[in-house]
Amino acid sequence: MPSKKNNPDLLLIIATLSLLAVGLIMVYSASEIVADYKFHDSFYFLKRQLLFAGLGVAAMFLVMRIDYWTWRAWAKTILIICFVLLVLVLIPGIGLERNGSRSWIGVGAFSIQPSEFIKMALIAFLAKFLSENQKYVTSFRKGMLPALSLVFIAFAMIMLQPDLGTGTVMFGTCIVMIFVAGARIAHFVMLGMLGLAGFVGLILSAPYRMARITSFLDPWSDPRGTGFQIIQSLFAIGPGGLFGMGLGESKQKFFYLPEPQNDFIFAILSEELGFIGGTFVLVLFTLLLWRGIRIALGAPDLFGSLLAVGIISMIAIQVVINISVVIGLMPVTGITLPFISYGGSSLTLMLVAIGVLLNISRHSRL
């Protein structure tokens, strides 16, 4: 068990809190019109995001002081709890349905999204499993198959909601962890072929997913339907230019871009703050990911290294998918932008994950 204690990674803290600050500003700017129209309170979304940001930051600094080996001891219990929540969310009357997906459980005036928390639970459990069974990682039957079986079960339960975006992030994160742990390339080639066939099957099995692919290839074929979001997103980014139209001056947030405080908040940010503002956010994410990779490389044991790899992979995959969707490089997935988009479950999870990273950095050898 690691015993050396350093100061937590200061640059990681700065990058995280800077992204959070940008997120709070943009949540208000992007949502004020919608909030005033729906709830007669332009600060409605900001106040809720501030609450979760406060709780999340407090949790981050608390978790930073908890030895990361604690997650190894509790990984199985936490995973079981998350699986129970994934079952509960599918039960009518318990799970809440929004935009065609039953992904939330109501808790008073708020709601939680179990599929967000299963990502962190799987990261902790896989880090434990792979570090304890490293000698079997190159074996498909004893190493990769048990790990993938668990991932596939979680993915299938998320798809019952359905939530392909969150499932994709979770699956991609787990694959990166298994690869870094030392799995054979040949197994990944075989898995990739099966995964591609399965992914195509999932798309073809749901008309709305196929419509997203069609609208991605040619959004103007249905500009008022499936292509509406991506067209409005590009209409926001285009006029932003180098310096943007000015904070609070977005035109697309006036009911052109649906729920601009969520998945497409980067489009509003680019419209108001321009290329400079968008680049600044990407630099902050790059700084955060660089510090995370450094922490993973300096972790004193394989469990800590894999735990850090999982957290950084989760954040990186989510950032890449979200921004790719916003600028038209990928079909719409419903993935939020970490620390920036509105959403309590996602924000809380990300800040707790950063807290785990900070604790690993306190034991780092670098």
Image (tube, rainbow, N blue to C red):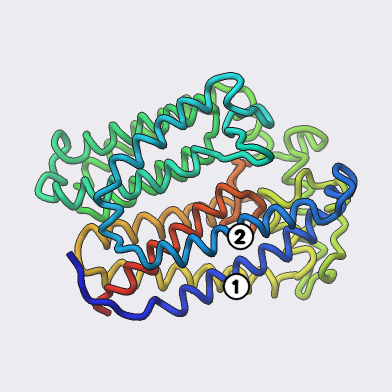
Q: What amino acid type is highlighted by mark number 1?
A: Ser
At which x and y percent is residue 210?
Answer: 61, 28
Q: In this view, does 358 lie to the left or right of 288?
A: left
Q: What amino acid type is highlighted by mark number 2?
A: Ala
Return the mark for residue 18. Answer: 1
Q: Pick whichever, 232 or 364, lies toward us.
A: 364
Real-space CA distance between mark 2 and mark 1, rounded to the nearest whole angstrom: 12 Å
Residue 98: image quadrant is: top right
Disc 2 element: helix
Residue drawn at (78%, 32%) of the image? 225
Disc 1 element: helix
What quarter of the picture does the C terminus occupy? bottom left
Q: In this view, does 146 lie to the left or right of 354?
A: left
Q: How crowded is mark 1: few (under 14 residues within 10 Å), some or many (20 or more)?
A: some
Q: In this view, does 203 lie to the left or right of 261?
A: left
Residue drawn at (26%, 69%) of the image? 299
The residue pinned by badge 2 equals 53
Upstream in sequence: badge 2 or badge 1: 1
Residue drawn at (54%, 59%) of the image? 56
Circles 2 and 1: CB distance less than 8 Å?
no
Q: Pick whichever, 189 or 69, lies toward us.
A: 69
Residue 5: image quadrant is: bottom left
